[in-house]
Image (cartoon, rainbow, N blue to C red):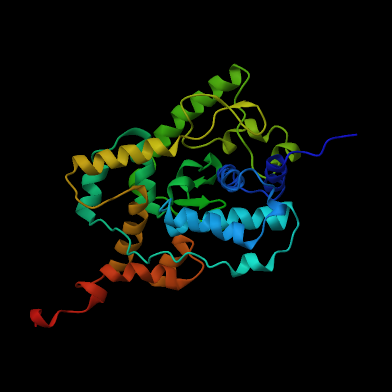
Amino acid sequence: MTQSPKLLDQVRDKLRVKHYALRTEQSYVDWIKRFIYFHDKRHPKDMGAQDVEAFLTHLAVAGKVSASTQNQAKSALLFLYREVLEIQLPWLDNITQAKAPKKLPVVLTVAEVQAVLSRLSGSHLLIASLLYGGGMRLMEAVRLRVKDVEFARHEIIVREGKGFKDRVTMLPEAVTASLKAHLLKVKALHEEDLAQGYGEVYLPFALDKKYPNAGREWGWQYVFPSKNLSVDPRSGKTRRHHLDEKGVQRAVKQAVRDAGLTKPATPHTFRHSFATHLLQSGYDIRTVQELLGHSDVSTTMIYTHVLNKGGKGVVSPLDR
C-alpha cells in the first residue's frame, strides 16, 4: 500500500502544476508550516475560521507584520484549503483583508539619478540603467534573456512581468554599446560552460521537454548570469542561474549613500523615476501605462503627484 505524500509535499506539487514561481512556493510553504506549528501541529483540515483568524491576528498584533505580509499569509492559507485540501470554506473569504497604507512613491530628480548611476559599475550599472531607461522591475531585468533584447528595434520584450503579462519597453540608446560589450563576455562564459558539459539554463513551463536542446541555445541564456554554477532545487540539475538581485540592491543602497541622498531609494525607485520623468516630459499617461505594464491607468496616475509645481501640480497661493 503506497503512502500518500506529506501535506507540504502536496502543497509543493500543486503549486508546481499551477506554474507558481519558486519564491511563491517557498513563502507559501513557510506560511503553512508556521500556521501548523502555531496550532501545536494540528492538521489544517481539523481547524476552522477561528484558528485562521487567531493566526492572522497573532501576526498583526504580536508579530507586528505589515499589511502586505499578513495578506500573503492569508493567500497561502486560501491556497491550502481550496487547492490542496479541496475544502470550500466560505468563511475564509469573510476574514478581513488587512488594509495596506497608500504611500506615494519615492522619486529621484534627473540629477539625483545621474549621481547614483555614476557610483555604480559593471552589471549593476547596466541593470540600474535598464530600470531607469526602460521602467523595468528589478526581477524583470535580472531574468532578461538574450533573445528578448532587440538592438535593431531599440526594444526590450519583458516576458511574464507582474501578473504573467508580456510587454514591450524601450532599450535606451545610451546603454546599447556597453550592453553589447557585456553580452560578448556572457557569450564567452556560455561557450566555456558548454565545453565543460554544462551551459543549460532553466526554461519556464516545461519548455525543456518540448524543446530538449533549447536550454543550451545562446538566445535563451540570461543577459545577467550568475558568476557561479548552482544546483536547481527543483530539477537537481547544475546550471548557471541569473544574477542574485540582492547584490544589485546592496550596490544601489551604497551608491545612494555615497551620493549623499537622504531619500530611501532602492532599485525600484528607478522605475518610479522613469514614469515621473516621462510624464514631466509631456508624454501621454496611456503611453506610460503601457510601458510600465499597468492594467489600470489609475495605478499610473499616482506618478502625477510630483508634476509641475508642488502637490498635485497646483500653484500655491503664496507664490501668486
* Side of 38 relative to 276 (left or right): right
Instruction: Give whichever of 153, 73 is nearer the camera.
Output: 73
Instruction: Give whichever of 46, 201 is nearer the camera.
Output: 46
User: Can you give x and y, in whole percent of width and height, for residue 301 in the image?
Assistant: 38, 71
What residue is shown at x 24% (from left), y 76% (from top)?
313
What residue is shown at x 66% (from left), y 27% (from top)?
236
Q: Is residue 190 above or below residue 159?
A: above
* Side of 51 relative to 299 (left or right): right
Locate the N terminus and report the quarter of the image it occupies.
Answer: top right
Mark yes or no: residue 165 visible: no
User: Can you give x and y, in whole percent of width and height, for residue 140 in the image?
Assistant: 48, 48
Count of residue discs? 0
Direction top: furthest residue: 196
User: Can you give x and y, in whole percent of width and height, for residue 19 in the image?
Assistant: 66, 48
Q: Give the quadrant of residue 320.
A: bottom left
User: Can you give x and y, in whole percent of width and height, for residue 69 in the image?
Assistant: 47, 54
Q: Is residue 52 above or below residue 235?
A: below
